[in-house]
Image (cartoon, rainbow, N blue to C red):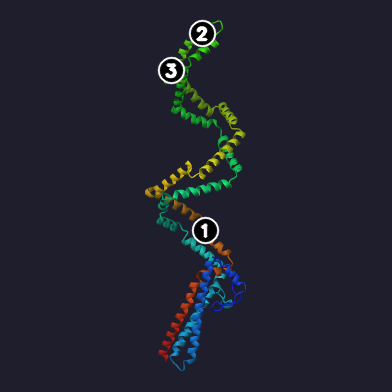
Amino acid sequence: MQVNTEPSTRPEGPGGAGERTAGEPARRRSVASGDAEKAAALRKMKLLALSLLVLMAVIFVVAFAFQEQYPWLEYVRAAAEGGMVGALADWFAVTALFKYPMGIKIPHTAIIPQRKDQIGASLGEFVETNFLSEQVVHEKLASVDIARKAGTWLSGPGGADRVAKEGAAVIRGAFTVLNDDDVQAVIEGMVRRHLLAPPWGPPVGRVAQRIFEDGHHHALVDVLVDRTVDWVRDNQETVNRLVTDRSPTWVPSFVDGLVGDKVYVEILKFTRAVQSDPQHQVRLSIDKYLKDLAQDLQHDPVMIARAEGIKAQVLGDPEIRELASRTWGTIKAALLSAVDDPHSELTVRFKAAVHDFGTRLVVDPELAGKVNKWIGDAAGYLVRTYRSDIAGVITDTVARWDAEETSQKIELQIGKDLQFIRINGTVVGALAGLAIFTVAHLVFG
């Protein structure tokens, strides 16, 4: 957290109560409430530590003044003396972390401002080594079982709705950012590169060859023959009229009728023979023609050129641009309409798919294991590839901080706890002073 306070214009003493600048009240009002609470707690702890030092000094003065009249005060004096030494030593140690004690540039003091960049580099290296390792990431992910937790959330109430809502927001945002002309240009380029640039003849011929060799075209031939038989059976008058229209005018009409009936009967007989005989010569001829066509599309330069000519006629520049425009417009309108309607088929099916996937993650251990493995592998790859870059964020961020500001930030976060060092130093120093004086008195008298 950032601390918007500035250092004192005068060096602080052991209590940190140096004179403040005139603009400090205004700066304190701009500090966030959380930082203000921490700053108040820090000042309170500093005041407590300073009060103990002052108390020890007062006790020392009083005991020193009356120890000849009251010999037992020598023990009190020794304890107070040790407490002052401990308090001053620990004040120096704590203060030396953040600033020069009393403003005096003593070597190896103001450690954080002076070694800010080295601290940032060490912190980044520590995070990279101990947190951004594949083993640590894999072990943590394995203990969390992300797949089952995600499945429980997705299959629970509101999970699928939340995913659909966020997905709709992403789609709307993407359409807002995307430029229609740019997308159409991309679609047009893809059509030209993947549809127009390659020759059509050979690939179409190869596909057709497989279809004809496997006999998949026979169903289509059957349909055409059946339709032909049905048409001939239901259009005798049409056949008679065609015969009459093409016969000489001098032929009597009854002769035209007889010839028409004969032609109709023969045509009907012929088409039914083709319909009933799978090995009819017409069927075999159709098979041979189609197979030859497939070969010509692959190997005959003339046929390949004709296929290219058809392609150019069907898909010229205007047609391609219109196709790209229609494709993008249709996709965009359909998706926007679907995501804006919570009851649309796309939204309903998407929610159902998400819910089903979440349920399978919960009840299918094999699927959950695969998903966990995918997540672990992906996280391992990211850590392995970008661990230095991630840790570098810490180093670079600390390097950009102002040295004074960095010191203030750290002191605000941990300074309150460090004041306990001063308090403990005062107490331990007093006990040590008392113990040393007692032992010396017992030994030397």
Give the number of the disc on residue 390. Answer: 1
Image marks 1 and 2: residues in contact by CB distance under 8 Å = no
Label whose residue precedes the other's in the sequence (1 or 2): 2
Residue 1, given in percent of the width and then of the height, sits at: 54, 65
Query: What is the distance, in whole Å, between disc 1 and disc 2 at their CAs?
Result: 95 Å
Residue type, label 2: Asp
21 left or right of 150 in image: right
Label whose residue precedes the other's in the sequence (2 or 3): 2
Label 3: few (<14), some (14–19) or many (≥20) C-alpha neighbours in 10 Å: some
Give the number of the disc on residue 292. Answer: none
Q: Secondary structure at mark 3?
A: helix
- The residue to which callout 3 is attached is 272
In the image, is residue 406 above or below residue 231?
below
Query: What is the distance, in whole Å, between disc 3 and disc 1 at their CAs?
Result: 78 Å
- Between label 3 and label 1, give the one nearer the viewer: 3
Q: Secondary structure at mark 2?
A: helix
